Amino acid sequence: MISREQTRQNYDRMSRWYDLFAGSEKKFTETGLQILGVQTGERVLEIGFGTGYSLARMAQQTGESGLVVGLELSPGMIEVTRKRIQAKAPERSVGIIQGDGTTLPFSPNSFEAVFLSFTLELFSDVEIPVVLEECHRVLKREGRLGVVSLLKKEVFTCQIYEWGHERWPVLLDCRPIDLRKNLETGGFRVQAAKVQTMWGLPVEVALGRPS
């Protein structure tokens, strides 16, 4: 795994043109948003919002009575996101914070929903339980956790990708994970899940509830 500082620098460099080559992720992010089902008036947190596609979508869904907050490590991504929000949802309430998913600066029971799309698998095996514990803490008792991630399976495409990840961790920084196992170990019961394929790689979209 690369360091947190290397991750920040990497996404700062990519921020201006990230949308040009990450468009293939939007289909899966959209599926995640559909499963999460954000409602008018809800308070929602996204961890690792990238260039803000999901933040803008959720800000429109929560409406004027709701609140969407985004936490992102990269200042470059934050700059791009602010411009997107101004263009796509200027009248909505969106909070943007630079920070780390392992330490969420929010009180317990602050949100109805938390969303991560191609973010959880950026954390190490040791850090993933910490991130999920933080998500559990800030969610309300009946809250929802939506996660989109590369799925670890015994298929050739995963094996090739993992081989590349080991050799070029900056270029291929995401890695396939056992999402369901991580969620259940992290104190969530999986209420819904869907597996899709991106360039031959399995992607799982899951909805968890605090157990």
Image (tube, rainbow, N blue to C red):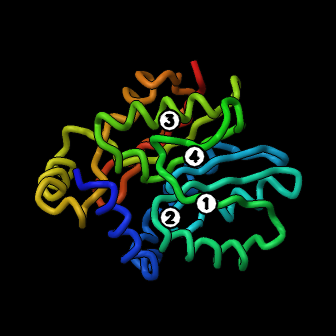
Q: Quadrant of the C terminus?
A: top right
Task: Determine the residue located farthest toward the top in the rendered image.
Answer: 211
User: Marks 1 and 3, Cα distance to the nearest angstrom?
Assistant: 19 Å
Tell me the tag on residue 54.
1
| 37 and 184: which is toward the camera | 184
Residue 159, percent across and down? 15, 48
Closer to the eye: label 3 or 4: 4
Q: What residue type is labelled 2?
A: Gly
User: Marks 3 and 2, Cα distance to the nearest angstrom?
Assistant: 23 Å
Tell me where residue 57 sits by quadrant: bottom right
Tell me the tag on residue 156.
none
Crowding near pointer 2: few (<14 within 10 Å), some, many (20+)?
A: many
Closer to the eye: label 1 or 2: 2
List the residue tagged with mark 2.
50
Determine contact: label 1, label 2, CB under 8 Å: yes
List the residue tagged with mark 3.
193
Residue 150, percent across and down? 35, 48
